[in-house]
Amino acid sequence: MTNHHTTGDGGSIESRLTEQEYFRPPPEFVGQANVTDSSIYDRFEENWPAAYEEFAELLDWAERWDQVLDDSNPPFYEWFTGGKLNASYQAVDRHLPERKDQTAILWEGEHGTTERIAYQDLYRRVNEMAAVFREVGVAEDDIVTMHMPMVPGLPISMLAAARIGAPHSEVFAGFSAQALADRIDDAGSDVVVTIDGYYRRGEFLDHKEKADKALELAESDPETVLLFTREDELHEDVSIDSDDPYVLVDEVLQDKQGVSVEPVARDAEDPLFLMYTSGTTGQPKGTQHRTGGYMAYVTATSKYVLDIEPADTYWCSADIGWITGHSYIVYGPLSLGTTTVMYEGAPDFPHKGRLWEMAEKYDVDIFHTSPTAVRMFMKWGEEIPRQYDFDFRHLTTVGEPIQPEAWLWYYEHIGGGDAVIVDTWWQTETGGHLITNLPALKDMKPGSAGFAVPGIEPAILDDQGNEIDPATGQAGNLVITKPWPGMLQTVYGNDERFIDEYWRAFSDTSSDDPEDWVYRAGDGAVHERDGYWRILGRLDDVMNVAGHRLGTMELESAVAEVSDVAEAAVAGRDDPEKGTVPDIYVTLREGVDPGEDVRDRVVGAIEAEIGTFARPANVWFVDELPKTRSGKIMRRLLEDISNDEQLGNTTTLRDPSVPEDIRRQVQD
């Protein structure tokens, strides 16, 4: 099938993925699901926005709200105005009467060290850390920047900051010193939280050195850096001078044992945290999330989409340094009183069965990961998970569109053919899921994100801002036409940038009528004739091939149909006749040797799925693809290689040496 719409340059965004079959949710799942009443969709449509009270009522409010939505000043929407609550209280305190002895956080270090932190213990540690923050001068509304890996001190620090009304800004531990410095400066933080070291692939890494360098690079001058220690003693390469701003957390904690800190009642619109995300140009954007709307939204979607129950052991394998970890490792699951799993190390250390070994050991019920990880599991082979006895009832994917081939592999080899799968579309800016199935109510369709979450109103616009008729199978720009509680408040300190990045493209920015304001997601999408939404990926990942605008996801999905392929990335090569032609960079599954026969199958798959006009200029077999630390493929670096240009910035890569290795392979 071919779906397209005409764009301003006369080209088209095309969707040529083969239609997929449907999979019904297993009856056993439906029988126990948190949402089994399909009227929820009509209820939210007919009673919008008042129906969002159902989300807010999952929380315990210090003061109830007066108004669900104040949309008098778009796009600066306000949710649950007049209400007061504390996020730390939602995640910890309110569970103590019923489940103080239940494990809240189940943490495993890379070397197998385990901590089971019960809700009562989490309460104690959060209170003590809140007292530490106050000891070093953190006041309500001060922004605390954190640069922490996946250790218990990270969620404890987040919840402690929230307890005293101090927004937090967690910077992913893998980010460079310069990235940390930029974020400290932008947030204006006087207090930074970090750790001496952590483990990765068997190495005990010196983490403090990044903070040291960041303090040199930062234009601001933080007064205090709170330093956790990963082991009983400081990392051997770490030292603290008397004139340093570093304060050892353990030393301050000695005087805080058993201290109780009353949770500060925050206005629903008070900020809870900043999450920095890359902008199309310029400095990273400090995505600012509110307390009330965000907490209501992530708690509800954790319950309704992820189907979390308090008795579950739930594992999202993301990093808390990203929004997925904030929403669906910390705030959402803990607000529901469940056991949330954290893992420090790499998924293939000390062996490629590590995740499944843990899933068996902890009897994990719900597993949440990315399509990138699924493709990695595929590359390693189904014989690895087959060795372990785990039984998931629910699987989630997040972060990018999942190709049907990867979905089917996940369903069969990880879900055993009897787990429900939800593919989720959302963004740092949206706070929580926007397009995904309520799993007991809709059939699963590989490659499709599903239906919109109740209350969410997506639409497809052409490049001139004209709405494409719903359910016509035509591709275009994905937008959200009404606000929702989990949405960002603004870009921290820059309201104009907030408007420019997310609203100006398709809104009448001179209007005070909320109907004239439309959120631009920046993704391409298709609303299929059956009502399912298919996400095509970022619109800047689109190439014009002989007048056809093709998304890289379309091409990569076609390549993924080849059984020898573990993962593929497409880059545009400049061509004097066609404008752009695709180069395909491929990693192969273990045991597969590169050769002309495999290359021919890759080319044949593209011609069969897309058309001969999309025939690639080259198919390159590489050992690894360049990925950011969050697992996203950096296609622009592959474009640099394809076009023999100087490599762009590689500092955000998990392994900055990969592009040069690929360049050498290509040039040889």
Image (tube, rainbow, N blue to C red):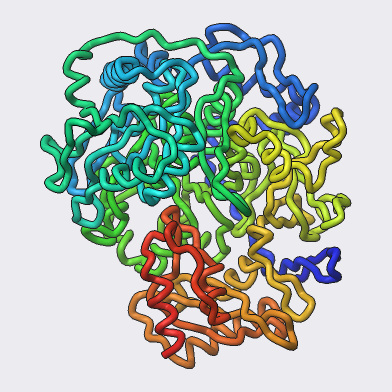
Q: Quadrant of residue 223?
A: top left
Q: Is residue 69 left or right of residue 89?
A: right
Q: Is residue 396 above or below residue 569?
A: above
Q: Is residue 604 above or below residue 317?
A: below
Which of these two is toward me, 345 or 112?
Answer: 345
Residue projecting furthest to the bottom? 596
Q: Residue at x 46, y 60 (%)?
A: 372
Q: How many marks?
A: 0
Confirm whether residue 483 shows in the render: yes
Q: Residue at x 26, y 27 (%)?
A: 117
Specify the quadrant that holds the C terminus: bottom left
Q: Is residue 516 left or right of residue 331?
A: right
Q: Residue at x 54, y 46 (%)?
A: 284
Q: Quadrant of residue 473?
A: bottom right
Q: Position of residue 55 (x, y in %)?
A: 61, 23
Q: Residue at x 22, y 14 (%)?
A: 256
Q: Position of residue 281 (x, y in %)?
A: 62, 53
Q: Position of residue 378 (x, y in %)?
A: 41, 66
Which of these two is toward me, 240 or 9?
Answer: 240
Confirm whether residue 363 shows in the render: no
Q: Is residue 300 above or below residue 605?
A: above
Q: Position of residue 480 (x, y in %)?
A: 74, 41
Which of these two is toward me, 418 or 652?
Answer: 652
Q: Is residue 322 left or right of residue 196?
A: right
Q: Is residue 618 left or right of residue 520?
A: left
Specify the quadrant that holds the N terminus: bottom right
